[in-house]
Image (tube, helix red, strand yellow):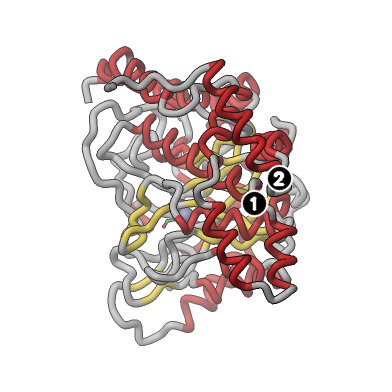
Amino acid sequence: MSDFTGPTGASIAAAYALAKERYAAIGVDTDAAIEKALTVPVSLHCWQGDDVQGFEVTESASGGGIMATGNFPGRARNGEELRQDLDTVLQLLPGAHRLNLHAFYAETDGKRVDRDALEPAHFSRWMDWSKASSVALDFNPTFFAHPKADDGFTLSHADAGIRSFWVQHGIACRKIAMAMAQNQDSPCVINHWIPDGAKDLPADRWSPRRRLVESLDAMLSDDASIDPALCVDAVESKLFGIGSEAYVVGSAEFYQSYALQRGILYCLDMGHFHPTETIHDKLSSLMQFHERVLMHVSRPIRWDSDHVVILNDDLAAVFQELVRGCALDRVFVALDFFDASINRVGAYVTGTRAVRKALLAALLEPVAWLQSLEQEGRGAEKLGLMEDLKVMPLGAVWDMLCEKAGVPAGAGWIAEMQRYAEAVQAKRGL
Ligand code: RNT
Ligand code: ZN
C-alpha cells in the first residue's frame, strides 16, 4: 500500500461507532468533544508560507535571530501566491481558523513604504481576502529584518531616534490592527515581539529594560482611535536568540510583570524557555492572575528551532491543562513554526492538524473521573487510567471530526498536497 488515500465514509463511520462506545464506557461523549474541538480558533501564521521573508520592496532577511533553514522549492513570493497556498491549506484543515499577519507582509504596489508609515490600506488585499474567506486576521508589528534593527536593539535602543522610529511602527500597527478588527466580526490580537538583546555579557542589563518600559508605554498609551476590546495587545518574551545568547531585554519575568501591570496579554511561545522547560505547568500559575494569555504553539528541538508542530507530549499537555482548567476560552492559540526544507503547505497542514488533534485528545479525557481518583488518594488507579487513555481510539474520533468538517480524513490530505505541489508550486521556478 503506497498511496495516500485516507479512510472514507463507511469505514470512518464503522470505526467511529466502536470508538464512541469505548469512550462512552469511561463517561466521555465523543460527539460533544468533536463539536467543541471544531470551534476553538487556531491562528495560522502567514510566515510559514515564505520562510519569514515578507514582501518588502527592499532586500530583507528574516534577521532578529530567527532563521528558516532549507530551500524546498515552491516558496510563496507575494501576496497572491501566499493567499493561494493558504486557501489550499484551509481546505485541508478541520475547524475554525484565523490568519496571523506580520507587518512586513504589507502590499505596497512596488512603492517603498517604511515601517513607521504603514497604513491599513497596505493590508487591504489581506482584509478583502479575510472577508471573502471568513478568516479573521491577527497582526504583529515587525521589529526585525530592517536596517534600524541591525545592531540587535529596537524599542530598547540607546538611541532615542531609533527607539522613536520603532514606537511609531508599533503605533502604526495598532491602527492597522484596529482596521482589521473593524473589518471582521472579531477582535484582532496584535503581538509585540522584539529581538532586543546582546550576544555577550552586558555590563548594563538595567538601562535597556528601563527604556523598553518607556517605549512600550509610549507605544501602547491611550489613543482615542484604539479600542482595547478590538485591538488586543500582547507581549512575547524570549530566553535567547542567535546573537542574543547572553541577554534578552524582553525576558519572561519582564513581560509577565509588564503585561499584568498594564492589563495586556502575555504571550508564551513554546520555544522561548529553557530547553527542558515546558509551558504547560505555567498556565495554571499565570492564569491565576492573567485573565487571558496568547500562546505561540511551536516545537523547539535543542533550541528555539521552530520545527513543525507535531502531536508530542508537550503539545498534548498544554491542551490537557487548558481543558482540565476550563480555560480554553481564555487563551488565544496561534502557531509559530517555519520549516523551509519540506513542502510548506504540508508543514502548515501537519502542524495545524496536530494542534487540533491535541485539543480533541484533551477533550476526550474523563477529567472528572481522573480528578476524583486523585482526591480519593487512588494514585495507582489514576496513573493507570492516564496510561490507558493514551491508546484509546483517538484516531477513529479524529477521522470522524475531519469527515464532519468536510476535509480529508487520515493521511488523505497528503495526496491533495502532492497534487497542489505539482499543479501550482512547481511552476513558481524557485
Ligand atoms: C521569535 C518569536 C516571534 C516570531 C514571529 C515571526 O522568536 O517567536 O513570534 O517567530 O513573530
Ligand atoms: Zn513566537
Residue that lies at the very extreme toward the bottom in this rendered image? 203
* Residue plotted at (57% across, 59% down): 386
Residue 228 vs 201, above or below: the answer is above
* Residue plotted at (52% across, 44% down): 355
Residue 217: x and y, percent?
A: 64, 66
Identified by mark 2, the residue type is Val
Label 1 environment density (alpha carbons within 10 Å; few <14, some 14–19, many ≥20): many
- Residue 344 found in image quarter: top left
Classify mark 2 as within 8 Å of ligand 2 or not, answering yes or no.
no
N-term mark: 1 or 2: 2
Residue 354: x and y, percent?
A: 48, 42
Instruction: Find out whether the residues at labels 1 and 2 contact each other: C-beta distance under 8 Å.
Output: yes
What residue sits right under mark 1 in the picture? 365
Residue 262 vs 392, above or below: the answer is below
Front-most of residues 385 and 232: 385
Left or right relative to 112: residue 177: right
Residue 8: x and y, percent?
A: 50, 18
* Residue plotted at (65% across, 60% down): 265
- Residue 424 found in image quarter: top left
| Residue 374 seen from this side | yes
Left or right relative to 315: residue 256: right
* Residue plotted at (58% across, 23% down): 14
What residue sits right under mark 2 in the picture? 28
Q: Which mark is residue 390?
A: none
Residue 416 vs 187, above or below: the answer is above
Identified by mark 1, the residue type is Glu
Front-most of residues 409 and 378: 378
Label 2 environment density (alpha carbons within 10 Å; few <14, some 14–19, many ≥20): some
In which quadrant is the N terminus drawn? Answer: top left
| Residue 109 seen from this side | no
Element at label 1 = loop
